[in-house]
Amino acid sequence: MSESRLREQITLFGKSLFDRGLTMGSSGNISARLDDGWLLTPTNSCLGRLDPAAIAKLDKDGNHLSGDPPSKEGFLHRAVYEERAGAGAIVHLHSTHSVAVSCLPEVDARDVLPPLTAYYVMRVGTLPLVPYYPPGDRTLAEAVRGLAGKHSAMLLANHGPVVAGKTLEAALYATEELEETARLYLLLHGRNPRCLTPEQVTALQK
């Protein structure tokens, strides 16, 4: 896909996320890989009001080449790209239900959400919890790097999800599935829901 088309997609998908309340204010960021680097939404930008031409372009080492200054959380994206050669895009949000789940003390840090639906298993799989780090703390990148090779999605404690996909569309759909499953989990919390069995999960993974 051309760079201009990717810029348009980031803008379109960002507005869709904002309009549906999955991101608010200037929170969240989106990136997409190019042959010669990657695109990243600007720092302090609202995903609902992006300008395609202003989206930052970085080289493969994360150096800013053009556009507005990139998101301060770009180091997260770089860590994931370096560990996942097949990742073509990354979506990071502070979406309400996912953040709420990330604040619960009883979740399993190895896999935060249970297999409630088939689409969650297929699009997200296992979801590890990354310990809390203060905003802008670059040591978070190393924590993410240690998990990104094995997991396409991670949940940052008291912060939000980071989701990679082969394409921008795939990353977006997986992020939406994660948020919806987090909402279901909160609705069913304490009610002992029927989850997919290990055999059913294995069949889906195949």
Image (spheres, rainbow, N blue to C red):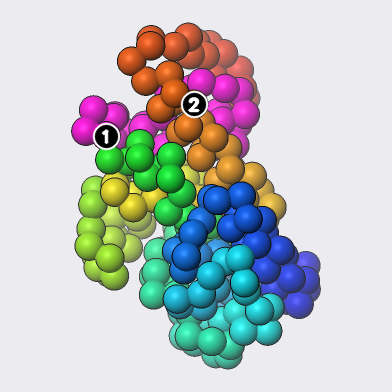
The secondary structure type at the circle numbered 1 is: loop
Residue 32 appears in the rendering = no
Please report whichever mark, 2 or 1, sits nearer to the chain's N-terminal start: 1
Left or right position of 201 against 7? left
* Quarter of the image that includes the N terminus: bottom right
Percent position of residue 184, x then y:
49, 26
Which residue shows up at 61% across the image and 50% down it?
20
Residues 91 and 63: in front is: 91
Q: Is residue 126 above or below residue 135?
A: above
Q: Give the main secondary structure of the magenta stretch.
A: loop
Percent position of residue 9, x then y:
72, 65
Percent position of residue 79, x then y:
41, 64
**Residue on which disc 1 sits:** 104
Residue 11 appears in the rendering = yes
Q: Is residue 144 above or below residue 153?
A: below
* Mark 1 residue type: Leu
Residues 83 and 3: in front is: 3
Measured Cα–Cα span from mark 2 to mark 1? 15 Å
Which residue shows up at 38% across the image and 10% down it?
192
Which residue shows up at 68% across the image and 84% down it?
53
**Residue on which disc 2 sits:** 184
The secondary structure type at the circle numbered 2 is: helix
Instruction: Inspect the magenta stretch and tell me whether residue 162 lies in it.
Output: no
Residue range of the region highlighted in magenta in the rendering: 104-128
* Mark 2 residue type: Leu
Which mark, residue 152?
none
